[in-house]
Amino acid sequence: FRCHCVARRAAAMEAAVATPVKPTGLPPRVINLFNKFDADGDGKLTFNEFSVAVSLEFPNLPAYATEQLSDIFGKYQQGSTGDEHVDVLRFYKMYAALLFRNFDVDNNGVLDLSEAQAALAYLANGRKITIAQPLDESKGVDKKWFWEMYKTMI
C-alpha cells in the first residue's frame, strides 16, 4: 500500500512540473511563447531556450538587437551560475525590449507613432492598436513611452 501512494505522489509531482505557466494579466502571445519554449516545463527559460524563442518570434530582428541578446538576458536573469534563467514575468519585460528593438531598425532609440502602433499590433496578433501620442510627437515614441503603452495591453 505504501509503495502505491509513493508512486502516485511521484506521478502527481511529475505532472505538476510539466504544467504550463498560466499567469493572469499578461498578453497571450507572450505566455504562449514562453510555454512553447520552456522545454522541460519548469516555469523557467534558460538562455538557450530564450535564444531559440527570440529567433523564431522575431525572424527579422535587426543585427544590432541580435548582438544584444546576451546582455538583455543578463539584465533580467535569475539563478546562480550554471542555473541562469528567467521566469515568465521577467520574460514579459524582455519581450517588450525586443519588440521595441525589432521595430527600431535604425537603432536610434525612438519609434515613430506608426512603428509603435505596428509593434503593439504585432503583440496583439495583428489587431489594430491605437496608442496615446507622446506630448511631443515630433520626437517619436521612446522606450519609456513604449513601455507604458505595452503595459496597458495586459
Image: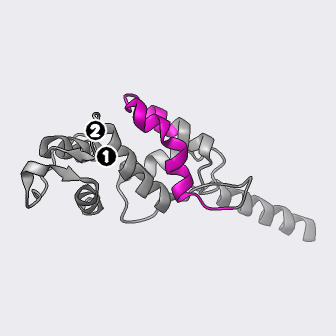
Q: Overall secondary structure of the magenta stretch?
A: helix
**Percent position of residue 67, x then y:** 49, 36
Identified by mark 2, the residue type is Phe
Circle 2 sits on which residue?
Answer: 103
Circle 1 sits in a helix, a strand or a loop, which is it?
helix
Residue at image point 22% right, 59% down: 145
Identified by mark 1, the residue type is Phe
Q: Which mark is residue 100?
A: 1
Would residue 17 be found to the left or right of residue 3 on screen?
left
Does the magenta-highlighted stretch encompass residue 150?
A: no
- Span of residues in magenta: 53-79
Q: Which mark is residue 16?
A: none
Query: Looking at the figure, which quarter contains the N terminus?
Result: bottom right
Would residue 13 be found to the left or right of residue 97 on screen?
right
**Percent position of residue 143, x then y:** 28, 54
Residue 61 visible here: yes
Circle 2 sits in a helix, a strand or a loop, which is it?
helix
Residue 10 versus residue 34: which sits nearer the camera?
34
Residue at image point 42% right, 30% down: 63
Residue 1 visible here: no
